[in-house]
Amino acid sequence: MPSLNITFTDDEMEAVRAAAAAEGKSLKQYVHDLPLREQQRLQFVRFAAGWGEQHAEEFDEAFPDEAPPARHQQGAEAA
């Protein structure tokens, strides 16, 4: 099974150990999970941003006072 040797400064290692302890995980499990969680986070952000873009017009119609000024100006120019 592939593995990595990762170098940390003393301060970084202390911070990583504290973060692992705060989650109740071993250092090895915590460091293993980090890139997987980041991948899931990025996937969620991409989905959420896409969903927001798909529903922006509905939101603007339902809450016209909440639309950002730039979006109001773009709409006015397109009309």
Image (tube, helix red, strand yellow):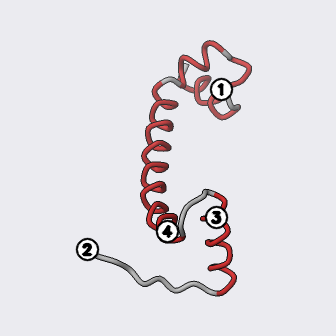
User: Which residue does the numbered mark 4 point to in the structure image?
Assistant: 31
Position of residue 30 relative to residue 45, above or below, is below
Q: Quadrant of residue 1?
A: bottom left
Q: Residue at x 66, y 86 (%)?
A: 10
As measured in the structure, the alpha-carbon distance from the residue carrying label 4 to the one carrying label 1 is 45 Å
Of residues 49 and 30, the one drawn nearer to the viewer in this rendering: 30
Label 3 secondary element: helix
Q: Earlier in the sequence, mark 4 or mark 1?
A: 4
User: Which residue does the numbered mark 3 point to in the structure image?
Assistant: 21
Label 1 secondary element: helix
At label 4, the amino acid type is: Val
* Percent coordinates x, y for residue 39 in the rendering: 42, 54
Q: Earlier in the sequence, mark 3 or mark 1?
A: 3
Q: Residue at x 66, y 59 (%)?
A: 22
At label 2, the amino acid type is: Met
* Percent coordinates x, y for residue 50 in the rendering: 45, 35
